[in-house]
Image (cartoon, rainbow, N blue to C red):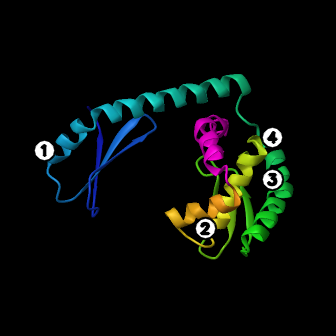
Amino acid sequence: MEYTLIRSSRKTIAIQIKDGKVIVRAPYRAGEREIRRFVDANGAWIDKKLAESAERAAQKNKAIEENGLLTMDEIRKLANEALKVIPERVKYYAGLLGVNYGRITIRNQRSKWGSCSAKGNLNFNCLLMLTPPEVLDSVVVHELCHRFEMNHSDRFYARVLSVFPNYYECRKWLRENGDMIMGRMRQSE
């Protein structure tokens, strides 16, 4: 099995599937045989994840064929709509959580739905306007909860679920459909 090896100061060996390719991350001290054994031992998992990756790529291509790539005008319209909708949703959920936040920025990104800086500034992808409202809300709650926990610990998710009990359903929807939506973003822009 072919893979790209990335060595770093990490302590364990890990496998990642990205864009249909296998990436192995290993400590500097790990020997080639140890790495190969680890990859071989996880062959079934790798095959499963490669098949899932190929299916997502096919769905993404199908979505582009059916809906086309977004034009700059369509992206602008989505961003303008997001500028109206998302700050209201942030304000609502910030009130429920009892948290403050900084600036809200709307972006057109190809890989992230949202982010929260250490200063409390929130960024959201304009493509959220192509998702169901509850999915958009789940991203808003996720980013606001980073104001309490800048990680994805059990405490973080407990806080998310305290305000948004169906968070995992929305996250599942985004995992199953998000690539198709992001795939509509033009690569050259």
Q: Nearer the viewer, residue 120 or 73?
A: 120
Question: Quick one: label 1 or label 4, which is nearer the N terminus?
Answer: 1
**Label 4 packing within 10 angstroms: few (<14), some (14-19), many (20+):** few
Q: Which residue is mark 3?
A: 82
Residue type marked 4: Glu
Residue type marked 2: His
Question: Quick one: label 1 or label 2, which is nearer the N terminus?
Answer: 1
Q: Is residue 172 above or below residue 26?
A: above
Q: Magenta: predominant secondary structure element?
A: helix
- Per the model, the C-alpha gap separating discs 1 and 4 is 51 Å
Q: Which residue is mark 4?
A: 74
- Per the model, the C-alpha gap separating discs 2 and 3 is 21 Å
Label 1, secondary structure: give it.
Answer: helix
The magenta-colored residue range is: 165-189
Label 2, secondary structure: give it.
Answer: loop
- Per the model, the C-alpha gap separating discs 2 and 4 is 30 Å
Q: Residue 69, how many percent across, how many down?
A: 70, 33
Residue at image coords 59%, 74%: 118
Residue type marked 1: Arg
Mark 3 near mark 1, Cβ–Cβ under 8 Å? no
**Which quadrant holds the N terminus?**
top left
Q: Which residue is mark 2?
A: 146
Which-is-in-front pick, marks 2 and 3?
2
Question: Quick one: label 2 or label 3, which is nearer the N terminus?
Answer: 3
Question: Quick one: label 2 or label 4, which is nearer the N terminus?
Answer: 4
- Per the model, the C-alpha gap separating discs 3 and 4 is 12 Å
Tag of residue 33: 1
Q: Residue 48, how many percent across, how many down?
A: 39, 30
